[in-house]
Amino acid sequence: MAKTVSKTDRPRQFMKEKYRVLFIASHPVQYQSPIFRLMAQHPRLDMEVAYCSLQGAEAGHDAGFGMEVKWDVPLLDGHPWKEVPNKSPAPRLGSFWGLMNPGLWRLIRRGKFDAVVIFTGYRYASFWIAVAAVKTSRSALFLASDASEIRALDQSRWKATVKRWLWPWIFGLADMVIVPSSRSVKMMRSLDVPASGVALTPYAVNNDWWLAQAEGVDRREVRREWKIAEDAAVVLFCGKMQAWKRPQDVLRAFARANVPGAQLVYVGTGPLRAELEAEARELGVSEQVHFLGFVNQSQLPRVYRSADLLVLPSEYEAFGVVVNEAMLCGCAVAASDRAGAAHDLIETGRTGFVFPCGDTEALAGFLRETLPRKERLREMGQAARQRMETWSPRENIEGLLGAIEIACRPR
């Protein structure tokens, strides 16, 4: 576990009143922007965000959803930011040469930042431009990573081998590596990154916004829209319907559990949707399964608040911020043990259930036992909301600030 440094442990003579910090992000992210807004209000942070692309704030094709997406919540409000021109001949996310932002060099070299935090992954050319600029400046280099395992998503052994060789060198370049979960901390330590060089900054959302939005939801009205009875037990899958998300596991466990009156709701879309609809018919549960399609960010509190149990069955999920969102809305969560959030936020039997990835029988058993007990579901939902009181932007920002204080001490 990364060392937690209390304020009383930090030598006062090395602490500045305010730190000038540059964050470099590939593009605006609906989860990250609210944290930036709160950081901008912190009295000890003079912060700025450099975006390499504005996809997300502007409409763009999302390969995971298989459609054009523009988030309907403000992503650029409330924090100082600038777009660094992308000079790539084929600009796009997900490609090494898709982000080429040479202006990062001048911005970093002339900015006199105490710390530069790079959120863009090493798979982009702009990452290396930024790293080179920081290493030739007086700024502390922070690398942010949500990676929680070496295993490659496509199971390629050669990729895992390359990572084992490459990652210790890449993260060894940093003065500090910031990670969002305890599982990520363990992985960094397995790469021989020293404990003093890893900081846990909990992957948080804007808790206050989610709590306020959930409070105003009329569950009865939402369920009428869904054509679902008010007293039905509702299981929810929320995400991209891709193979590694394993949405079929929820369907199979739901059918196997065979709980009278229970309903399954899918929110999201993707390449597996047609297969899921066909399998629901084959399993004889199509009347109990509802496909709502893509739901934009501002409407998600209605979804979580009107469900009883979110299931996150992914075989790879660095964290799984849908867990935060659901729990803040009073929805219990069952997640596979491959999700980072499962290890930090879910307590089996109290706030939800953690099951071995792919074990549909274990998940079915939990559904069979829990869904008929509506009071038990409500208790778990309440406990889930309470758990989030100590996993919030407050802990995220204080974790980052503590790491900056350590990394920026005079050498």
Image (tube, rainbow, N blue to C red):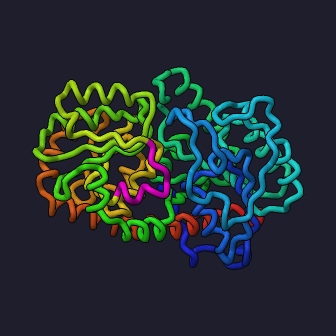
Magenta stretch: helix, strand or loop mostly = helix
Q: Which residue is drawn at 85% across and 49% down?
A: 136
Q: Give the range drawn in magenta.
A: 294-304
Dividing the picture into quarters, in which one does residue 250 lie?
top left
Using the image, determine if residue 326 lies above or below residue 259.
below
Q: Which residue is drawn at 56% across and 58% down?
A: 73
Q: Is residue 337 visible?
A: no
Work out whether residue 85 or residue 73 is closer to the camera in this orientation and state it. Answer: 73
Work out whether residue 318 or residue 161 is closer to the camera in this orientation and state it. Answer: 318
Position of 198 compared to 117: left or right? left
Count of numbered tags: 0
Residue 138 image offset from top left, x and y in percent: 83, 57
Q: Residue at x 21, y 45 (%)?
A: 263
Work out whether residue 406 or residue 309 is closer to the camera in this orientation and state it. Answer: 309
Residue 384 image offset from top left, x and y in percent: 31, 62
Magenta stretch contains residue 296: yes
Residue 171 image offset from top left, x and y in percent: 64, 43
Question: Which quarter of the rendering shows the C terminus?
Answer: bottom right
Residue 378 image offset from top left, x and y in percent: 21, 63
Work out whether residue 34 or residue 154 is closer to the camera in this orientation and state it. Answer: 34
Dividing the picture into quarters, in which one does residue 404 lie?
bottom right
Q: Is residue 100 visible?
A: yes
Magenta stretch contains residue 91: no
Q: Which residue is drawn at 80% across and 29% down?
A: 89
